[in-house]
Image (spheres, grey):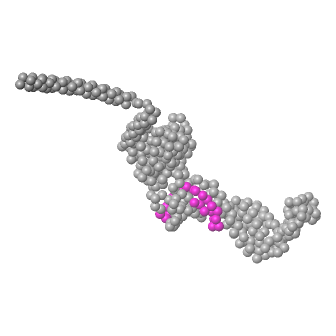
Amino acid sequence: MSRDFVGALLQLNAEKQVPREQLIRTVEEAIESAYRRVDGDEDIHVQIDADSGKIRVYRARTVVDEVEDPLTEFSVDEARRHDPKAKPGDVVEYEQLDQEAFGRIHAQTAKQVVLQRLREAERDVVFDQFADREGELITGTVNRVEPRAIILDVGKGVEAILATTEQSTLEHYRIGENVKAFVLEVRRSTRGPQIYVSRTHKGFLRRLFELEVPEIHAGTVEIRAIAREAGSRSKVAVASRQEGLDPVGATVGQRGARVQAVVAELGGEKIDVIPWNDDPSVFVANALSPAQVVGVSIDEEKRIATVTVPERMLSLAIGREGQNARLAAKLTGWRIDIKSDVAAAEAARTDEGRDADAARVSADADGVTPAGARETDDATDGTGASASAEASTNGTDSQAADGATAAPARRSRAAASTKGASS
C-alpha cells in the first residue's frame, strides 16, 4: 500500500503539476477531516512520510494557559505530563492510534475530501501560473464562439474569455484557429481561474512589437507612447537608447518587414511609427504624420498646441472623421488645433486691422488727434480760406458793377432837369 501510495503521488505530481509537498499536505488534511467527523476525535492528527508513504495517526492537543475547548486544548500542567518541555503554543502528542481504526466509512469520506482538495490545489496552481502572466501574451485555440465572447483553450483544461468588446472589427474567428491575446486579468472562481484577454488593448500592440523587433525586446529601442483605435489605425512613438541607432528604421524593418508582420497579426490595421521628441512642438508635428506641418505654437499653461499646415494638407492632417488629429492628441497628451496657412494669414490680417481700429478709438478717447486726422483738418482749413477770399473778391466786384450802373442813371436825371428848366 505504501509503495502504491507513493506512486500515486508521483503520478498526480506529473499530471496536475501540483507540488509533492502540497499533495501530501492535502491528503493529510483529508484523512484528518474524515476522522474528525466522529464526535470525540477532534484532536486526531495525521502525518505521512513522503519517501516511504507510511501513515501515522495520533492524538495531539494545543498547549494554552486557559483552556476554552477541552477537546483540542491542553493546560500547561496537563501537557507537561506527556512532554516536560511543553509550553503555551506547542502541539503535544499524547496517544498513538492504530490504522485499523480507520474503517470503510472513514476511507470513503477521506476519498471524497482528497478529490475535492486536489481540485482546489490544482486550481490554485493554475491561478498562480496565469496570475503571473497578466500583461503578457498567451496563445490559445478557439474552442467555441458565443454571442458575447469567444472561448479560447489555453491548455491544462483552462479557458480564456475574449469578450466581443475586446475583439477587433476587422477579425473573424473559426473553431480550432490559433489566436494570440493579451492577458488583462485573472480571477478566482468556483470553477477555477477565469482569464480575461484582449486583442484591442494597446498593450497587445506593444507585445507584438517586442516579438517582432529584437531591438525593442532588448531595450535599445523603447516604445514611449501608443495611441490606438483597434481595427482602424494606431500611432507608435519610439525612441532610441543607443547613439546612432535609428528607432523608426529599426521598428519598421527592411522594406517594412517587421511592421508588416504586426499589421498582418492585427488583420490589416494601419500603423504609423513616429520618432519621439522631448520638444512638444516637434513631437506634435511628428505625431500628425503623414501631413506636413508649417509651424506649431505651444500654450504650456492650457496645454494647447496650435498647428499650421498647408491648405492642401488640411484634410490629411485632420484625417477621416478627425481620426489623425484625435490619435495625435492621444499620443502627445496635448489638445491640438489645426489651421491652414491661408486661414492663419487671413486671421493675422484681421487681427492687424482690429488692432489699428482699437488704437484709433483709444486715441480719440484720450483727446489726441492722429497724424492723418491733422493732415485732413489742415487741408480743410486751406479750402475754407480760399472760399472766403473768393467770396470777398466777388463781393467787391459786385459793388463796383453797381457803382458803374448808378453813374449813367444820375446823368440821365440831370439832363432831364436841364430840359425842364429851359421850357
- Decide: is 356 above or below 174: above
- Residue 309: percent from left, percent from top: 41, 41
- Decide: is 158 above or below 417: below
- Residue 401: percent from left, percent from top: 18, 25
Which residue shows up at 78% across the image and 75% down it?
103
**Would residue 384 be found to the left or right of residue 308 on screen?**
left
Residue 346: image quadrant is top left
Which residue shows up at 72% across the image and 70% down it?
113
Which residue shows up at 51% across the image and 48% down it?
330
Seen as rendered, the residue at the extreme bottom is 105
Q: Nearer the viewer, residue 157 or 309?
A: 309
Seen as rendered, the residue at the extreme left is 423
Residue 360: image quadrant is top left
**Would residue 259 be found to the left or right of residue 153 on screen?**
left
Which residue shows up at 76% across the image and 66% down it?
29
Whether residue 399 can be seen here: yes
Residue 40: image quadrant is bottom right
- Decide: is 350 above or below 83: above
- What is the magenta range? 174-196
Whether residue 250 can be seen here: no
Q: Nearer the viewer, residue 371 or 247?
A: 371
Q: Is residue 181 magenta-colored?
A: yes
Quarter of the figure with the N terminus:
bottom right
Q: Nearer the viewer, residue 107 or 367?
A: 367
Quarter of the figure with the C terminus:
top left
- Decide: is 325 above or below 191: above
Q: Is residue 366 magenta-colored?
A: no
- Residue 26: percent from left, percent from top: 73, 65
